[in-house]
Image (tube, rainbow, N blue to C red):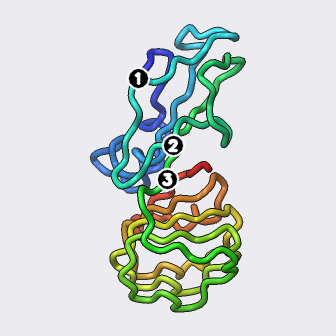
Amino acid sequence: MSECMKDTGADNCPCTRNCPRHGNCAACVANQRFTTMADVTGLACGDQIPCPKTDPTMPDATFLGWFCRGKPYDFNSTVGFDTTLTAGWAPKSIDYKLPTGTTVIGETAFEGTPLKSVEIPASCEWVYPNAFKDCTTLRQVLILSADTKFTPTAFDGCNDVYIFAPDGSLASYLCTQENGFVFVETFR
């Protein structure tokens, strides 16, 4: 990592589990952020942020690049203020993609189904109670719209699921310490 960037993962860790691997746990890895610290590192207005020499990695996910405010970051641009870069991720593979045009996933629609990963289309407005209840093998959910709404019990009985969704997604509220879900910002 460049000396002009500060890894804010440990300071602003989204990990709510107080894990002993703070900074290296799933939540920390999934939400890597780097912030330029112009006043600390000597970067001046008009300087460029050096591109990190290595890309971060996360199991079963593809690194999409570095993003700033939801857009791909251009390392040829210059800094005019402190800038936060966020690692963009997407699941490596999806077992089941709901059809485009799906607007609702009904109660118990996939209850107990042995899915590993599922993609919820941008057209989906609601995921109802117990829609994915007891899908114990479910590990990744890709949600294509930040506006898709969920009932708190949509994924009851599921544990340790990565929720890939756009920044500002209502899906981030599904990720709690109790269920071990990890919210991962995705950019497309």
**Mark 3 to mark 1: distance in Å?**
21 Å
Residue where numbered disc 1 is placed: 53
Which residue corresponds to the image point at 56% horizontal and 51% vertical from the top-left? 186
> Decide: marks 2, 1 in contact (CB < 8 A)?
no
Which residue corresponds to the image point at 48% horizontal and 49% vertical from the top-left? 14
Amino acid found under the numbered disc labelled 1: Lys
Mark 3 crowd level (few <14, some 14–19, many ≥20, 10 Å Cα) = many
Along the line of sight, which residue is nearer the eye, 105 or 173? 105
SS under mark 2 = strand
Which residue corresponds to the image point at 47% horizontal and 65% vertical from the top-left? 176
**Mark 3 to mark 2: distance in Å?**
7 Å
Question: Is 47 placed left or right of 19 in the picture?
Answer: right
> Decide: marks 3, 2 in contact (CB < 8 A)?
yes
Disc marking residue 147: none
Question: Is 181 placed left or right of 143 in the picture?
Answer: left
Image coords of residue 133 (percent x, y):
45, 85
Which residue corresponds to the image point at 61% horizontal and 77% vertical from the top-left? 99
Q: Residue furthest left?
A: 20
Q: Tell me if residue 96 comes above or below residue 46 in the rendering.
A: below
SS under mark 3 = strand
Amino acid found under the numbered disc labelled 2: Leu
SS under mark 1 = loop
Image coords of residue 84 (percent x, y):
60, 32
Q: Tell me if residue 14 comes above or below residue 73 in the rendering.
A: below
Along the line of sight, which residue is nearer the eye, 136 or 16? 136
Residue where numbered disc 2 is placed: 64
Amino acid found under the numbered disc labelled 3: Ala
Q: Quadrant of the N terminus?
A: top left
Mark 2 crowd level (few <14, some 14–19, many ≥20, 10 Å Cα) = some
Image coords of residue 144 (percent x, y):
62, 63
**Mark 2 to mark 1: distance in Å?**
15 Å
